[in-house]
Amino acid sequence: MANIVFSNVTKRYGNTLAVDDASFTVNDNEFFCFFGPPLSGKSTILRLVLGLETPDTGEILIGGRPVNTVSPAERNVAMVFQNLALFPHMSARDNVRFPLVERRVAEAEIEKRVADVASKLHIGHILHKPPAQLSGGERQRVAIARALVRDPAAYLMDDPISALDARLREETRVELKRIQRELGKTLIYVTHDQEEAMSVADRIAILENGKIRQIGAPTEIYDRPASTYVARLLGSPMMNILKSVRGEGVVEAAEGTIRIADKAAPADAVEIGLRPEDIKVRPWLDEGAARSDGGVGRPARVFEVEPLGGYTVVTLAAGQARLRALLRGQPDIRPEAMVAISCDPSRVHYFGQSGGALAR
Ligand SMILES: Nc1ncnc2c1ncn2[C@@H]1O[C@H](COP(=O)(O)OP(=O)(O)OP(=O)(O)O)[C@@H](O)[C@H]1O
């Protein structure tokens, strides 16, 4: 059993609250991701799990055992370091052997464990090579093998693929997910990249200034963000968030005034959120035609068009408001054209005074 529990854990550095009353459970075999902007406390949480830091208050349990006073060596969690730092002068095999040699494990046992981990990670055929002769993906597998050879209860990764180029990052994150599933070990993962967090994690914890703002499955957080902060963090282009102007049972999304959806907003709605892919854009016929079309299409002017191949991002100006819509394919839409925009009312997000999500 290697679940990891934080119970009201706080960690300060001087006046900085690096981790603020954090409570969460990472389940056995789970791919659990911490995501947040720089300095939000991600690395400090990893350091607390590893035992490189001690909580000021609160309790940490690993596999049900309180570990606040247990040394890093005795915690049986392994770290795969940022940028996959392998020893360049050693072969892949010696890199993988290193943690066991350091712990003076018997040679026969070392050979057995290296063979075992190499077969799990499919690196047997590259063990003789130095890191410089390996691809990015292979280096990653060797780095993971080095962490796993100790047979840790859980392993941790701090932005392990941020140094790779975009294409290799995409490849390696797929690989990572597969490896984690096959190994069936608890993995705590830190990333700055929202797409990476969404794609690899079973669950994500969203951090802001040391506080956990939301924990959930990626799609759950994406579909039901608990606040404007979380809503803006996940999704690209990010959610459109506009002031809500209410009247006559109609939601007006505005800095200017555009009616997005015919539905009464909750009385305490201050802002409304629209995901770019939820905005429908059609040719503008005229006001009458828009009205007869369910009354939800409102005029907007096309401000900018960004073709991305499979998708097109259209920036729309409606009154003073600017909205970004994500459209499939390459629609025939040009800057300055008038269009009718609408949004399924069930897809509108409402936020209250403090930015917290309101029931839809
Ligand atoms: N050793 C330290 N001494 C003093 N302050 C620290 C120390 N480590 C972290 N902090 C502070 O604690 C807060 C959280 O830092 P942390 O490194 O955990 O954030 P992070 O989310 O991992 O950031 P990044 O994404 O930039 O790596 C920051 O305000 C940081 O300046």
Image (cartoon, rainbow, N blue to C red):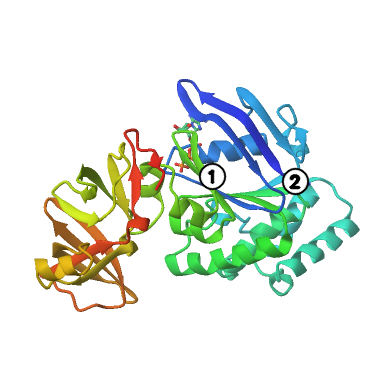
Q: Residue at x 81, y 45 (%)?
A: 103
| Dot 1 alpha-carbon crowd within 10 angstroms: few under 14, some 14 to 19, many 20 or more | many
Image position, residue 122 (x, y; %):
71, 71
Q: Relative to 33, is 168 above or below?
A: below
Quadrant of the rendered image containing residue 129: bottom right
Q: Residue at x 81, y 66 (%)?
A: 115
Q: Relative to 354, is 214 above or below?
A: below
Q: Secondary structure at mark 1?
A: strand
Name the foreground residue: 334 vs 96.
Answer: 334
Name the foreground residue: 259 vs 195.
Answer: 259
Disc sitting over residue 215 in the figure: 1
Q: Residue at x 90, y 59 (%)?
A: 108
Instruction: Calculate the distance from the C-alpha at mark 2 to the C-alpha at mark 1.
Output: 19 Å
| Dot 2 alpha-carbon crowd within 10 angstroms: few under 14, some 14 to 19, many 20 or more | many
Name the foreground residue: 263 vs 330.
Answer: 263
Left or right, 233 with respect to 256, comes to right
> What residue is pinned by disc 2?
2
The mark total stands at 2
Image position, residue 232 (x, y; %):
36, 48
Image position, residue 215 (x, y; %):
54, 44
Q: Is residue 197 visible?
A: no
Name the foreground residue: 14 vs 267.
Answer: 267
Quadrant of the rendered image containing residue 84: bottom right
Q: Secondary structure at mark 2?
A: loop
Q: Is residue 135 visible?
A: yes
Name the residue type under label 1. Ile
Quadrant of the rendered image containing residue 346: bottom left
